[in-house]
Amino acid sequence: MEDKRLIDVIRKKVKLKTTHKRYRHIEGVVTSAIWLANRYGADVYLAEIAALLHDYAKNYTKSELMHLADKFNLKLDPILTNAYQLLHGKIAAKMAQEEFGITNQDVLAAIEFHTTGRPDMSKLEQIIYLADFIEPGREYADVDTLRKLSEDSLERAVFTALNNTMIYVLKTNKLLHPNTLDCRNKMLINNPSLADIS
Ligand SMILES: [Fe+2]
Ligand SMILES: [Fe+2]
């Protein structure tokens, strides 16, 4: 059931907790997520909640994230321990439960997996994953190509965003989380025509 007061409570807390710059990014993700939800027939209310909370743990330092991971009993793989920034989605999902009583599993998964993706993402998960890349404040080469693709096909846009992420991760010698690769491969297995994207 929709609860506009919950959205207000979350928005106020997010604003207090984040920097001005990050808050602008978060509101950009809200805008893009609502647009994508309308366009592709997902729940707009749930998209707004997930978008508002997706970076709720992004301001934490490595030691704070590790402490919270411990507190929430998260199982960490070696990639998450080393590329600790990847942890902020998992921790934000736990905080969404604890601080705001969010129990909707789709919302929690969209928050949790927005950094890495995972195989067989739901529509809402794909929307939050993609909104993070195309929100109006983002400026990087090819962002307009991805925005254009987002108008035509959620699936193609997410697939392209996964490819772009992997290219960036490899070029900058960062750790690649297996969820990102598995997600990308599974999409291509399910829909071989994705290979035709130029
Ligand atoms: Fe994030
Ligand atoms: Fe983000």
Image (tube, rainbow, N blue to C red):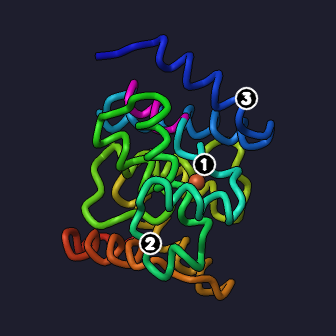
From this view, report whether residue 103 is shown above or below residue 9.
below
Quarter of the rendered image showing ligand 1: bottom right
Viewer-proximal residue among 153 and 25: 25
Nearer to us of marks 1 and 2 is 2
Q: Quick check: marks 1 and 3 in contact, CB under 8 Å?
A: no
Overall secondary structure of the magenta section: helix
From this view, report whether residue 185 is shown above or below residue 113.
below
Mark 3 packing: few (<14 Cα in 10 Å), some, or many (20+)?
few
Mark 1 packing: few (<14 Cα in 10 Å), some, or many (20+)?
many
Q: Which residues are magenta?
A: 45-52
Q: Name the secondary structure under disc 2.
A: loop
Nearer to us of marks 2 and 3 is 2
Say which mark, if any, is on residue 16. 3
Q: Earlier in the sequence, mark 1 or mark 2?
A: 1
Amino acid, disc 2? Leu
Residue at the outermost right position: 20
Which quarter of the rendered picture does the N terminus lie within?
top left
In space, the residues marked 2 and 3 are separated at their CA atoms by 29 Å
From this view, report whether residue 151 is shown above or below residue 11.
below
The residue that mark 2 highlights is 76
Camera sees residue 21: yes
On screen, residue 107 versus residue 93, left or right, reads: left
Percent of width and height locating residue 173: 65, 88
Q: Quick check: marks 1 and 2 in contact, CB under 8 Å?
A: no
In space, the residues marked 1 and 2 are separated at their CA atoms by 16 Å
The residue that mark 1 highlights is 57
